[in-house]
Image (cartoon, rainbow, N blue to C red):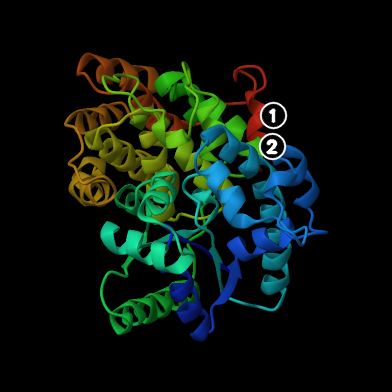
Amino acid sequence: MLRVGLTGGIACGKSHVLRRLAAHGLATADLDSVAHELMAPGGATYGEIVAAFGREILGEDGAIDRRALGELVFADAAARARLDAIVHPRVRQSEEHLVAALAAEGRSVIVSDAALLVEVGIHLRFDRLVVVHCDEADQRRRLMERDGLGEAAARARIEAQMPVREKRLFGHYRIDTSGTVPETEARADALASELLALAGRPRERLTLPADRARAALVHGEPGPRGLDARSLLESVVEADGVEMQRLAGRLAAAVPGPWYRQARGGESAPWPEALACAVAVIAAARGFADAEWVAAVASSLARLTHPDPEAVAGGVVAALAALAVSRSGRIEPGLPSRLSEWARAGERWSGAAPPPRLAAGIRAAVRHPVAPQAARAEAAASGAEPALAGGLVGLAVGLPAGPAPPGLAELVARLGFSE
């Protein structure tokens, strides 16, 4: 079963795209509608929301006045965070029940639609992410017409979300709805065909012995901004997936606000590629050698800690190199020859070429294919990221449970790896 997330800016037309996908037979889950049901009188979140925001948000019929609540939370980031904390866990629970039922029916593609998948950092729960976007002037005009808002109110609601031009960077697929309705529908039709074809192809399995997972973590540290490989994996176990807002709380010197505003200018080593081997371990825990998903994870992690596109590209390239080593079980001599292929993927996710140090780090691993410490030393001497070179070799040579740091063997076991 292929899990697909569908998101986009407010009033960008994702509901229309969702209906078009459903018309092609794809199973759909409108999470925004689920949230509305949960907030209705008698719904699972109704009482908590009223207790948190007061009866001033209720209409004459006792239902939550969504416009009144919207005016409150769109003007106050802390209030918006309180609302999200109440609603999102219940929405996810409802979604999982729906997905389980659809999977039992044998549906091959399930599309979950929600406006804030990226903002709340849960977009990596999906195999693929679709971002619906349009010109900002069109977005504002549509919102004003749809909700009867003035221009100032429409701007405030749009600005409360991640800018659409930024959100696009997280999508495996992007649908521009700025044109005519037939043009949008043609793009949605093409997407439906591609998703169904992808779901119909066999997925390459990825298995990784526990000793190689342990070695990747031991030799692939430290990580950027205090987020090392082990901390990343602990968060994955806690959340049963990669959740960016949760990871933001593990950063050194984290600041209040959304996860995608944690990166600061002037960031240096450890670089995002230090987490590449941990990303490969997460992919193996999922059980699939899915390069597109790996690239999405690596780019999001890089954006958490480093603001420059070059660093994001480096994180993607390094993660794809780690995936290649995970699949083969050894450091292939021809590994550096694949850099141009991976660089194209890195540029697709970042808009920039990867930094030159990536090649030096991978060459260090190739020159020391069974000696992670020697690979780390050479990488450091050349200005490359030692954690990448050491982690790559660790993925190939493994580490017995005995010498592993305390708790690491248990963490790897909790991720589902066996000896």
Taking the spot 63% from the left edge, 34% from the top edge, the residue there is: 412
Taking the spot 26% from the left edge, 40% from the top edge, the residue there is: 313
Q: Is residue 143 above or below residue 394?
A: below
Q: SS class of the residue under badge 2?
A: helix
Task: Return the mark for residue 414.
Answer: 2
Residue 202 can be seen in this image: yes
Residue 417 can be seen in this image: no
Amino acid type at circle 1 is Glu
Check the image and name the residue furthest to the right. 42
Marks 2/1: CA–CA distance = 6 Å
Residue 182 horizontal/vertical position (percent) = 31, 84
Quarter occupied by the C terminus: top right
Amino acid type at circle 2 is Arg
- Mark 2 neighbour class, 10 Å CA radius: few under 14, some 14 to 19, many 20 or more: some
The number of numbered badges drawn on the structure is 2
Residue 160 horizontal/vertical position (percent) = 44, 44
The foreground one among 329 and 146 is: 146
Location of mark 1 (residue) = 410
Residue 242 horizontal/vertical position (percent) = 54, 42
The foreground one among 328 and 71 is: 71
Mark 2 in CB contact with mark 1 (< 8 angstroms): yes
